[in-house]
Image (cartoon, rainbow, N blue to C red):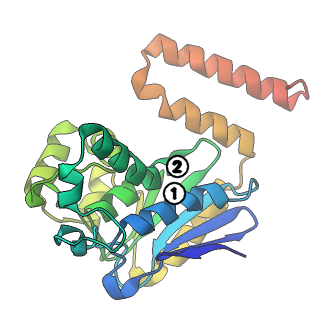
Amino acid sequence: MTLLEKDGVRVTADAEVATVTLAHPAKRNAQTPAMWRALAEAGRVLPGGVRVVVLRGEGKSFSAGLDRQAFEPEGFEGEPSFLDMARGSEAELDALIAEYQEAFTWWRRPDLLSIAAVQGHAIGAGFQLALACDLRVCAQDAQFAMRETSLGLVPDLGGTHPLVNLVGTARALEMCATGRFVHADEAERLGLANLVVAPDELDGAVADLSAALLAAPRNAVVETKVLLAGAAGRGYDEQRAAERAAQGRRLRDLAGLGD
């Protein structure tokens, strides 16, 4: 079932699994503000029964990052150019970037598990979009790079937080400041990739992982995701208390005593 198809984004759903596809292969799925709005809308059109969301890119690349037209003085038709953004007030600039970030924020919702299926290039905004997901399954030809600093910018689409959580501050700084490519084998060693497979095995590996994620009861998975997501911000005793509270809710639910 097709839920959305606009501005280089296609959303389909089959029972408990939805697929969000970047569908502009002629430009290696380069991203635009219109695509970001469509990606934000994708999170709003998902049926309540969806538990797993797969993010993929058509063609040889997952996403080559921001469409370079954004750097042209005229920018995109109907969109503020980078120069226009710079001339605006701080409040206007902040609000515009916050709007763009919405495309990257919903993938870690507690009621969903998201998987980025990455092949070829995942550069800049493409890297940040892959980082927005809970899990990443990569083809052996996957290449990640955070090129914003090389362009005089910073990663501003929500990617810095998960990157630091996955690889640590020093490694994240080195990757961002140099803009170098991180290939699939290194990504797996660093924890950026949960699994690396041959390119022709990518779809099958994602389908297998989706099935495995659906095997457990939804409420238990939701509680576990929330518990793990908050662990880094809690002390040991606080985390133990959070575990007790979550388990209490689960036991009451299993006993038919939930709200």
Q: Where residue 89 appears, x then y in whole percent?
A: 24, 41
Q: Is residue 205 left or right of residue 141?
A: right
Q: Nearer the viewer, residue 97 or 256?
A: 97
Label 2 crowd bin: few (<14), some (14–19), many (20+), radius 10 Å: some
Name the image quarter holding residue 197.
bottom left
Q: Where residue 105 appears, x then y in whole percent?
A: 46, 48
Task: Classify 200 as above or below 249.
Answer: below
Q: Where residue 148 appears, x then y in whole percent?
A: 17, 57
Q: Nearer the viewer, residue 229 or 197?
A: 229
Label 2 amino acid?
A: Trp
On residue 180, the disc is none
Q: Is residue 70 left or right of residue 47?
A: left
Task: Classify 226 as above or below 43.
Answer: above
Q: Is residue 32 visible?
A: yes
Label 1 amino acid?
A: Ala
Task: Classify 79 as above or below 189.
Answer: below
Kind of element beneath mark 1: helix
Of labels 2 and 1, earlier in sequence is: 1
Task: Classify 109 as above or below 39.
Answer: above
Judging by the rendered image, the residue that carries numbered circle 2 is 106
Kind of element beneath mark 2: helix
Contact flag, marks 2 and 1 (Cβ < 8 Å): yes
On residue 40, the disc is 1
